[in-house]
């Protein structure tokens, strides 16, 4: 037999089982208590009559009456003061019986249920009195020291019938309490599990595509309220993730379509008719530029896709941000000189553990971003340092700065603070996203501060590590 999977039914079954066990134990205990008290009362009344018979026997001895020898009969009579205890001839009345020392029956009352077997004589060191039950008869007996046996008893059929009625009443009451409790328990369980039903319905609507659906939270301090809050936060993150994914897909399609369209239009234009060599050369150069842009965009998207898939190779080792910065900035020195942009290097040893190649990609992307936003004749400062057990790379430019409303979205994919820049003149909007992805991979923090008209400062902070000395850094003039 399989246990039901319904949580409500399981709770109800456990509740019913425990309640039935408690009611059964209570009813059994009440019945046993009533039965024991009834038997004690009956035994006390019978024991009183046993003493009356005993007193009659002792009284006859005190008057010189002796039991006759074997083979001779003598009538046994109760004392007149005790005869009233055995009035009546109804089988439910009290009766008595007396046996001689040799075990022969001496006397018995007229209403005694014959035959009556003499109880077994107790062994040495055993009580000389006791009780026994024969069917619906309850009897008490005692042995005198000389060896006579005296017994009294009566039918306990009325008590048995009363106990049976009592047991039926207990059964009815326990059954009624169980049924009522189960009904109340079902109602309570239904109300208690109603939030789970609401959660399940909300999850179904979210799974069907309504990502804006949220679970109503009545009490945030309760267990289900806390669960609802956690699920709402999860659903919010899912909605944000799907929205970013949709936006990323749309932006990626747009970015890919532009260089492809350039290649197609240029190729179709020269294929319509014969062109001179210079035209073919310009067309091929345009196609190469578009292909190069397409290749860069594809590589950037591949880096982000690899990061999203948690498939980045763990190639972390001891390195130094100062050396990485120096090696990355050196190839761009001629470009800076052409635009009369001064680069100031303040590189102090900043040892850390990471992938030097990926960290250099952060430095390169941030430097190119600074060059793109710094006017000719401006200045860019690159600084590395170690502070509070963190190695830091800081790049500051004297560009146009970034408005405050753009800063929270600056690391979003395909996001551009300067909406006026054309896609053909600006980047794809993935450079800073790649920097943030690589920083997250290293457990580093990448943030930005900026003020319009005064430039921007990007700071990369990663846990430092003790390394050997680094070679002297050559600072370009």
Image: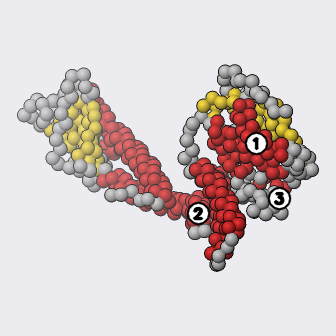
First reached walking from the N terminus: tag 3 or tag 2:
2
Could you tell me if the residues under marks 1 and 2 are in contact, i.e. CB atoms within 8 Å?
no
Quarter of the image for residue 203 reads bottom right
First reached walking from the N terminus: tag 1 or tag 3:
1
| Residue 470 in view, yes or no | yes
| Outermost residue toward the bottom in this view | 272
Residue 160 location, x and y as percent? 33, 53
Near-viewer residue (358 or 226): 358
Residue 70 location, x and y as percent? 9, 31
Disc 1 versus disc 3: distance between alpha carbons?
A: 24 Å
Which residue is identified by label 2? Answer: 203
- Label of residue 418 in the image: 3
From the viewer's perspective, tell me whether residue 349 is left or right of residue 314.
Answer: right
| Outermost residue toward the left in this view | 71
Disc 3 versus disc 2: distance between alpha carbons?
A: 39 Å
| Outermost residue toward the right in this view | 453
Which residue is identified by label 1? Answer: 332
Quarter of the image for residue 275 reads bottom right
Near-viewer residue (8 or 157): 8
Label 1, secondary structure: give it.
helix
Tell me: residue 7, above or below residue 274.
above
């Amino acid at each position: 037999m399989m246990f039901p999977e319904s949580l409500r039914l399981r709770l109800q079954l456990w509740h019913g089982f425990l309640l039935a066990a408690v009611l059964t134990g209570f009813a059994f205990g009440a019945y046993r208590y009533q039965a024991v008290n009834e038997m004690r009362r009956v035994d006390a009344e019978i024991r009183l009559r046993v003493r009356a018979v005993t007193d009659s026997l002792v009284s006859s001895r005190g008057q010189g009456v002796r039991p006759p020898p074997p083979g001779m009969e003598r009538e046994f009579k109760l004392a007149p003061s005790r005869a009233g205890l055995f009035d009546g001839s109804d089988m439910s009345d009290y009766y008595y019986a007396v046996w001689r020392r040799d075990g022969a029956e001496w006397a018995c009352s007229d209403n005694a249920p014959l035959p009556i077997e003499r109880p077994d004589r107790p062994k040495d060191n055993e009580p000389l009195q006791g009780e026994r039950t024969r069917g619906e008869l309850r009897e008490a007996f005692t042995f005198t020291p000389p060896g006579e046996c005296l017994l009294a008893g009566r039918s306990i059929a009325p008590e048995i019938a009363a106990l049976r009625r009592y047991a039926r009443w207990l059964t009815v009451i326990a059954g009624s309490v169980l049924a009522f409790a189960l009904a109340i328990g079902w109602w309570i369980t239904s109300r208690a599990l109603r939030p789970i039903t609401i959660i399940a319905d909300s999850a179904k609507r979210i799974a069907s595509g309504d990502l804006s659906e949220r679970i109503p939270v009545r009490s945030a301090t309760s267990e289900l309220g806390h669960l609802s809050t956690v699920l709402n936060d999860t659903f919010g993150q899912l909605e944000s993730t799907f929205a970013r994914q949709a936006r990323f897909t749309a932006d990626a399609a747009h970015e890919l379509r532009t260089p492809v369209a350039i290649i197609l239009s240029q190729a179709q234009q020269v294929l319509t008719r014969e062109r001179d060599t210079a035209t073919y050369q310009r067309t091929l150069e345009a196609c190469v530029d578009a292909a190069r842009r397409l290749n860069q965009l594809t590589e950037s998207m591949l880096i982000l896709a690899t990061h999203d898939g948690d498939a980045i190779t763990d190639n972390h080792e001891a390195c130094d941000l100062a050396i990485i910065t120096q090696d990355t900035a050196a190839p761009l020195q001629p470009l800076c000189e052409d635009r009369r942009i001064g680069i100031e290097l303040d590189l102090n040893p900043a040892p850390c553990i990471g992938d030097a190649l990926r960290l250099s990609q952060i430095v390169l992307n941030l430097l190119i971003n600074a060059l793109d936003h710094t006017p000719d004749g401006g200045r860019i400062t690159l600084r590395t340092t170690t502070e509070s057990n963190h190695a830091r790379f800081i790049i500051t430019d004297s560009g146009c700065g970034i408005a405050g409303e753009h800063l929270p979205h600056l690391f979003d994919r395909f996001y551009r603070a300067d909406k006026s820049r054309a896609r053909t003149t600006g980047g794809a909007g993935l450079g800073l996203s790649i920097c943030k992805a690589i920083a997250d991979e290293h457990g580093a923090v990448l943030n930005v501060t900026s003020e319009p008209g005064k430039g921007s400062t990007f700071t990369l902070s990663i846990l430092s590590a003790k390394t050997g000395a680094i070679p002297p850094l050559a600072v370009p003039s």
